[in-house]
Image: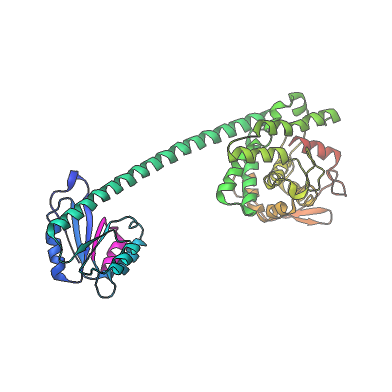
Amino acid sequence: MSAFVSQGTAGGGQPLRVLVVDDSKAALAATLSVLGELPGMTIESCVSPIDAYALCSRTPCDIVLLDYAMPELDGIGLTRRLRELPGHETVPIVMITSSTSSDIRLEAIKAGVNDFLNKPFDPVELQARVSNFASLRRAQLELASHALHLEQAVELATAEIVAREEEIIWRLARAIETRDGGTGQHVSRVASIASLLAAGLGYDEAHCRMIYLATPLHDVGKIGISDKVLCKPGRLTPEEMAHMRQHVEIGVRLLEDGTSELLRIAAAIAGGHHERWDGTGYPAGLKGQDIPLVARIVAVADVFDALCSERPYKAAWSLPKAYAEIIACSGTQFDPDCVAVFRQRWPEIVAIMHGKEAADDRSEPSVVEGGWVHGARTLRIVGERRQTGRWSPAFMDQGERN
């Protein structure tokens, strides 16, 4: 293998890399001598087609001239292999051959050969053909560079749009939560837990990200609920409860008919996160898998964090106590599959609830004879949930507001 750079690179740019492959050293020398007069090219040569393939595997060439009849691998076989290499899909390939067989030339074209030169070649014709392909190759490279630049510009613009969209979502969600006596951390934790559950249920990374961004809007309808009801420290009356429930329909109206997948997911979550697996939820009384899966996921995350959050109308529950309630409501309020993933990802959920810091004990709490064990402590759950597994009046009041 040999290489040299011909004089005078065109336009001061990078020289094109030209590879000549021929098992005849005399023919190779003649070809190199003619091509050496052309400006703007780095000429490399190989007597072995195997060596030529290895060379191109390391660094793509810009133009390839090859002989047809060679030992080990003929020109057609080498062309097929070159076309399979990244970066060689559109590289001009010229076959130099003494064969006039139309069958051979047709097979070579099918393999990816772009042009032919007869042996012995005419020096002027060789220079003209290679010069033409050099112009074509430079145009290809310029077009590819321009396309890459445009792609990068589009990616940058898209990233900026996405960033602005995310910022608007989070600011809106936090503004709504402050009306409910929160600090904005509730929506952040619910989004993180929902994304975690979605991943455990098989959603890909892109869809989990979409759920993470849509989840903070699950209670956007609370913007239409009066402060008197939203922040009432005591239990809600039946009339106030009915008013509170309207936040679901309000949220759906705000989000429906969106043009983006994000808004469509957000609308499904807002409209379904208060539905129950057993069909006793609201607003539509949907049951089981009729409830959108994204809404079933967020229902678990939302209720869990709401139980653990302090509000003007309730005290915060401990993590193990809230965990036990979620497990107890599997198959009644919550999708059992979502709860199963909730149990599997419990250590990560604890980390989220502790602000991503290591928890003292992330082991799964164990339910035992009407109570539960967490670490060295045993706590009893009494009063918040009836023996039937349905919410008590006090807990239902909390659940309506989360």
Q: Residue at x 22, y 58 (%)?
A: 18
Position in image of residue 379 (x %, y %):
79, 50
Residue closer to the observer: 43 or 22 = 22
**Is residue 58 found inside the magenta-colored segment of the image?**
yes
* Displayed quadrant of residue 308: top right
Left or right relative to 41: residue 246: right
Residue closer to the observer: 239 or 53 = 53
Tell me if residue 161 comes above or below residue 384 in the rendering: above
Position in image of residue 399 (x %, y %):
78, 39
**Is residue 163 found inside the magenta-colored segment of the image?**
no
**Is residue 359 in view from this perspective?**
no
Tell me if residue 9 comes above or below residue 247 in the rendering: below
- Of the 4 image quadrants, the one containing the N terminus is bottom left
Position in image of residue 266 (x %, y %):
64, 38
Left or right relative to 48: residue 325: right
Left or right relative to 355: residue 158: left
Q: Which residues are magenta?
A: 51-66
Position in image of residue 318 (x %, y %):
73, 44
* Displayed quadrant of residue 311: top right
- Of the 4 image quadrants, the one containing the C terminus is top right
